[in-house]
Image: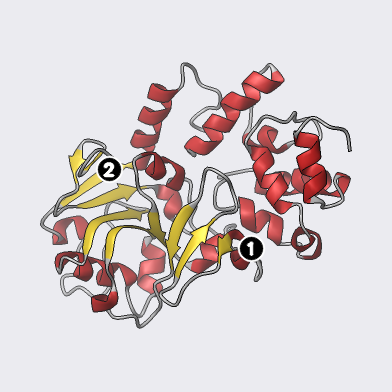
Amino acid sequence: MTGDTFAGISTENRVIQLIDPLAAENEDGYGMGYLRCLPLLQTYGVRQFTFPKGWLSAASSETFDAVVEDGDEGGHFRYTAIPGLEFDYTLIKTGQPADTLEFSQLCQITNQELEQSQSDSTTHKLLEAFKAGRIDELFLVTDTADFSVEGTVAQKPMAEDIDRISQISYQNLARHYIDKTFEQWYLSYAETLNVWLHHAAKEYTSVMGEKPTQIRDLFEFDVLEPGIRTWDILEFLASDLAKEDPAHIESVTRPWVESDNSVIETYIRNALQEFDYDCEQVQTYRSGNQI
């Protein structure tokens, strides 16, 4: 983001709607959408996010507290689990009035199914706060261009209900970034449109001497050499919590990885067993020393 623009579009008095179909809930995703758009949004200067708390914890009741630093009374947290992906997270509670919301910048990630299930629409409150001038820059990631907001009289698509709104395709934005940033493909678009994983794939190629063919290759720690950012995830997961809570591993990786989640969970658990779930052992191996 340069000044008051995002991807060349002015953000002054304008809502930016980013359409990512994988923000939608799916039957294998614990009612979650994916957060794959978040790393790319960070490259454009977006740092403050809100979405359902469960999207950071999936099936684990312990994961949320593990991946964020302690929050304040206003529901503000800091995601710190993965280096390079840190971001500010705000939990907007049901019943919280719109006139209590105030941000210099905020990005909400949501989907139509979630919106329709809410008796108290977060999106509606954010738009009201934006119109009242309490949110300077508002970004909304939705699963469809026809996304409509509960609580509005017209119940028509948001893009028709707001005077100043710009719609951007996440797929197009991500592909443009990948084509511009990398001299060649290291993973196909079909494998992932999470740009963090494309950076990991470039590191994999440099370290391993060949390109990965699938996302799962980036997590096969039994053969993976240090020097690839996915080791940060393994180091974070080397803990008693991953050993004691069967759901914790996938709960940490699930928001960021569009496929192969069960295989990746198996790869990670096998590696953690080799390291005895000991973070210091992982750090020692990564630094080039024998365990």
Front disc: 2 or 1: 1
Residue 170, image x, y percentages: 36, 41
* Relative to 8, residue 210 above or below: above
Residue 193, image x, y percentages: 47, 37
Q: Residue at x 15, y 59 (%)?
A: 162
The quadrant of the picture occupied by the N terminus is top left
Residue positioned most to the left? 163
Q: Residue at x 57, y 45 (%)?
A: 83
Do labels 2 and 1 touch, CB within 8 Å?
no
> Dot 1 corresponds to which residue?
66
Q: Residue at x 70, y 55 (%)?
A: 249
* Relative to 141, residue 130 above or below: below
Asked if residue 209 lies left or right of residue 57, the reply is: right
Is the residue marked by circle 1 packed among few (<14), some (14-19), or many (20+) residues within 10 Å?
some
Name the colouring of the figure. Answer: secondary structure
Asked if residue 232 lies left or right of residue 14, the reply is: right
Residue 194, image x, y percentages: 49, 39
Q: 283 and 181: which one is in front?
A: 283
**Residue 226, label in figure:** none
Location of residue 155 by image quarter: bottom left
The type of residue carrying mark 2 is Ile
Is the residue marked by circle 2 packed among few (<14), some (14-19), or many (20+) residues within 10 Å?
some
Asked if residue 158 lies left or right of residue 221, the reply is: left
The type of residue carrying mark 1 is Ala
Q: CA distance from mark 2 to mark 1?
A: 33 Å
Q: Earlier in the sequence, mark 2 or mark 1?
A: 1
Secondary structure of the residue carrying numbered label 1: helix
Secondary structure of the residue carrying numbered label 2: strand
Residue 63, image x, y percentages: 64, 64
> Dot 2 corresponds to which residue?
168
Q: 270 and 11: which one is in front?
A: 11
